Every structure is written in structure tokens, then in C-alpha cells.
Image (tube, rainbow, N blue to C red):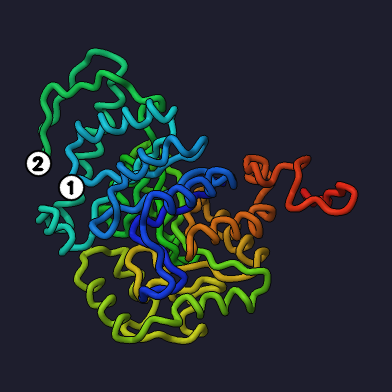
Amino acid sequence: MQVFWFIPTHGDSRYLGTAEGARAVDHDYLRQVAQAADSLGYEGVLIPTGRSCEDPWVVAASLLPVTRRLKFLVAVRPGLHQPALAARMAATFDRLSGGRLLINLVTGGDRAELEGDGVFLDHAARYAQSAEFIRIWREILARSHGDELYDFDGEHLQVRGARLLYPPVQRPYPPVYFGGSSEAAHELAAEQVDTYLTWGEPPAEVARKVADVRRRAQAHGRTVRFGIRLHVIVRETEDAAWQAAEDLISRVDDATVARAQAAFANMDSVGQRRMAQLHAAGSRRSRAELEISPNLWAGVGLVRGGAGTALVGDPQTVADRIQDYAALGLDTFVLSGYPHLEEAYRFAELVFPLLPRATRERLPGALPGGPFGEVVANAYLPRVSQS
């Protein structure tokens, strides 16, 4: 099991949908979140992409010198990046970081954002372009050990004599992650990516997506790993966790929710449409209506695009729900919480000790034999259970 955290380059807050309790995006704060994730034992961090975010490649590069083991899941955007340049960027980053790069292939679903960036392709054409992009990217990196040049002549993209002089550390290329809920997305994942990421839908829906991508991958003679993108709200008691969830959306008004939902409705993303269907657009509802599956809460998606659900509960309950998803074949969990600095510590403190032993043994904060917390009388250290 791999557990990732999130770098909030679009801002952070104690409350969604309001400037109250908001934190500025500056390097000092992003460094704090990255160093917390690094020292606590998270496998890596996802850095978001889009016009509402700082550039993920610049942010990731700036955080390399202040972290040690942390991996960076960084986006490539077909239509914005050219595949040969993206391959060169990936190889450079991977080599200079000692193999700490992971690639997030992002096709995009926000029409207004895409057009603002100069991309005017429809949904089907964007996925066709993305398939060509990642094929070129993979081939250039995979051939970087020799002198062979690469040609490709596709519907959307062409290269002639492409070559990479300096290879990446990870061979044949840094692993590629990708998420999407449409049939075209599933086919692209099955044919070309290493890990398919779903947003946090109820387990039965996730199981259907996993089965479909796995079946398609088998038809291509491939295997694909699976992961999930979720928020987490964990507290020492169940009641406290649900109160924290309610507090998170307590400052947002119905007009803000309505504006957000109207913007989401203009997107052609199947995944975003599925997120919106988890709650009634334009209203802030009760826990009973937003808890769409045991301990899976859709309140985040009232005003936040993309991943809109959170696991809510006490530590054992949240760990159990993670295990429910793991039982479906998911081994990568990309998590976040508001605010991201404090919640990185809270999740590590409360949930890491409850994860499977093989996962705990990789976490520096969960290893036996070292001091935990403040030393008490006569240098006595409390015993930590490793069962």
C-alpha cells in the first residue's frame, strides 16, 4: 500500500468556499507541507495542475532540495506540452532527483480553462491526442539508452527523429498515473498507463471501474495497478470527525454552491459529472444526504472541482474503509485534508499505526525503538503497540 499526500498549490483553508481561515500560497508554506509528508513517511505528493494552481513542475523542482525521499506526482498536459519536451523534462527531473518523479497524465475537462490555454479539442479528440502523446513520450524515454531515433505520424501529433540524450533513472520511464471515468479514459488507461486513479466513489462503483479497466488491460496483454484520490477527515472519535466535516462547509452559502455547480456543469468531464451526481446541486444538505456510502461524505464536492469526497470517522473506521478499497485491488491512496499541514500530521498519527504491517514498516514515524513524543519521568518512554 502506497499512501500519498497533496500539495495545495491552489490555496489552503480551514473552511471551504470562503476566504475566512485561508492561507496564502507561498513557498514557505508549501515547503512545510512537503517536509511534513517527507518526514512522516508518505510515499509521495500529488501536485495539482490547472490555471487555478501554481505550475506543478516549478513547484516540484523547488521542493526537491528541501526533501529527501518524497516522490512528486507531476502533471503533463497534452495540448499544452509537446511530448518530446515533456520527455526531456521528465528525464532531467528524474535524474537530478535520484528517481523521485511520477507522471500524472491529465487530459482536462474544464472547457473554459482549456480554451484559455489554447486547447479547443472536444472530449473525444482530447483523448485521442492524449493517447498519441503518452505513446510518443514513452517511446522516447524507453529508447534513451541507445542511438535509435523515433518517428511518429499521428492524427494530432507528429515527431521525426526524436531522441533523448540523457536517460531517466527509472527505466524504461517514470511510472505514469492517470484518471478518467469515460470509456475512452478506461481504454487509454488499459493500453498505456501504469496506475489508474479513480476519484472517491462508493466501493461498488469503484469495483466496476476497476473490473472494466482490468478487463481491457488483459485484452492488451497488460496489467495495471489501481489507486484512489480521496480527502480524509479523521478525529479521535466518530462524533468529532463528523463535526469537523460539518465545520469544513459551515461558512459556505447556497449562492456559492450554486455558482460552483454551474461551473462544473459546463465541463465535459465524465468524472466531474459523476462527482456532481453524488449530491444535489445548489444546496448544502445534511450528513444523512451527503454520506453516500458508510463514512464516505460528498460535502467537499459542493464547491470543489475534481475529487469531491472524503472518508470521515475515527481512526479505526477510516483505516477499515481504506482496507475496503484495498480489497478491491487498490494499492495507492492519494489523500488530502484541510488544512493540509495539520491534517498530514493528524492522519499519520492516528491512521498510519492501523495500516497493514508491510505499510507501517516503511514509515519512519511508525518504526519501533525510537522516542515518541515527550520523555516522561526518569526517561521512561511509553510502549508503542506494533500488533
User: Which residue, given by chain and number where applicable, does mark 1 sit on?
Assistant: 128
Q: Nearer the viewer, residue 61 or 322?
A: 61
Residue 64 position, x and y percent, is: 42, 37
Which amino acid, mark 2?
Answer: Glu
Q: Quadrant of residue 252?
A: bottom left
Residue that protrudes farthest toward the right in the picture: 378
Which residue is painted at 54% across and 46% down in the image? 42
Percent x, y for residue 300?
A: 42, 72
Q: Position of residue 215 (x, y in %)?
A: 39, 48
- Mark 2 touching mark 1, by CB under 8 A? yes
The first of marks 2 and 1 along the sequence is 1
Q: Residues within 10 Å of mark 1 (few under 14, many from 20)?
A: some
- Image height of 386 relative to 136, above or below: below
Given residues 208 and 69, the one toward you in this image is 69
How far apart are the two marked residues, 2 and 1, measured between alpha carbons?
A: 8 Å
For badge 1, the amino acid type reads: Ala
Q: Position of residue 38 (x, y in %)?
A: 53, 43
Using the image, determine if residue 14 lies above or below residue 124: below
| 285 lies above or below 339 | below
Relative to 136, is 358 above or below? below
Tell me the residue at 63%/45% (across/down): 359
Q: Residues within 10 Å of mark 2 (few under 14, many from 20)?
A: few
| Residue 62 seen in this snapshot | yes
Check disc 2 and report the residue beneath it.
155
Q: For the residue labelled by badge 1, is the local secondary structure a helix, a strand or a loop? A: helix
Image side of residue 103 versus residue 337, left or right: left
Q: Is residue 247 left or right of residue 165?
A: right
Disc sitting over residue 315 in the figure: none
Dot 2: element? loop
Residue 218 seen in render: no
